[in-house]
Image (tube, grey):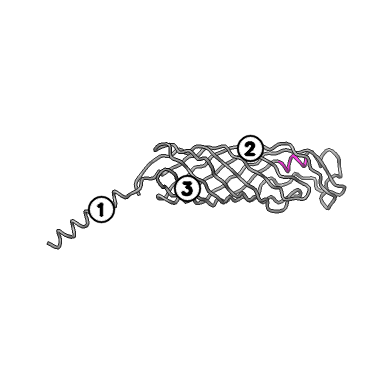
Amino acid sequence: MKVKVVLTFGAILLLGMAAWAQEFPRFELGADYSFARFNPNAAYTNGHSLNGGGGSFTININEYLGFQMDLHGYQSNTNNFSVPSGLSFPGGASGKVSGDLFTYLFGPQIKVRAHGFHPFAHLLVGAAHSNVYANAFKQICQPVAGTCSFNTSPAEDGFAMAFGGGVDIPLGKVVSFRPAEIDYLLTHFTNQFANSNQNNFRYSAGLVFSFGHTHY
């Protein structure tokens, strides 16, 4: 009798767990438009509004936790700036410079798959690349000898980190709409034109495609 009771209870428990089991995709692929406000954090430069786009690829370990790769690229507008005299620029310098920005980020993502919307948060670290410093070297240092105290192109790669989150709205089993992802984007370039953290803002919006659905 006791065995039957235990088996019955076990069967009910398993059925209940199966009923409550949540389906989640093993893989998520995002494609989006992205806006970044880049703050050079130097007295002689101004902030840049960058428009671009990119995407992400997430491998979900379970219903809530995934590992994400995030790749984005931006094209800037041409900006005027004036550099005061100093060790790197003996007589000061000025010019018009434009450049691209690319970020390559990786890290964990936590997502809550509530009914009708899926809020998420992530912490991503990696690298940033920009040719704006090489362009500044060409525009400022090369035309007139002695303008700059260095004669090699500045480093174009630096550390990057993004912290933030957003929300996905499922439109079906495969496609979700992402109206907003907002991140604090930190970059750190070290060269003759920049030697500090740049505290930036990033906004993205687009679509997310889900694959390999399974139960947890």
User: Which residue does the image show at 45% across and 38% down from the upper left?
Assistant: 176
Direction from residue 37 to residue 42 in the image, left or right: right
Residue 133, magenta (yes or no) = yes
Q: Disc 1 marks which amino acid?
A: Leu
Q: For the residue labelled by badge 3, is the local secondary structure a helix, a strand or a loop?
A: strand
Q: What's drawn in magenta, residue-wise?
A: 132-137
Residue 128 locus on image (x, y percent): 63, 46
**Disc 2 designates what residue?**
51
User: Does the residue at mark 1 contact the one at mark 2 (Cβ under 8 Å)?
Assistant: no
User: Which residue does the image show at 77% across and 42% down from the upper left?
Assistant: 137
Residue 110 locus on image (x, y percent): 47, 51
**Gap between marks 1 and 3 measured at Cα:** 29 Å
**Gap between marks 2 and 3 measured at Cα:** 24 Å
**Disc 1 designates what residue?**
14
Q: Depth check: 23 or 59 in front?
A: 23
As drawn, 138 above or below 87: above
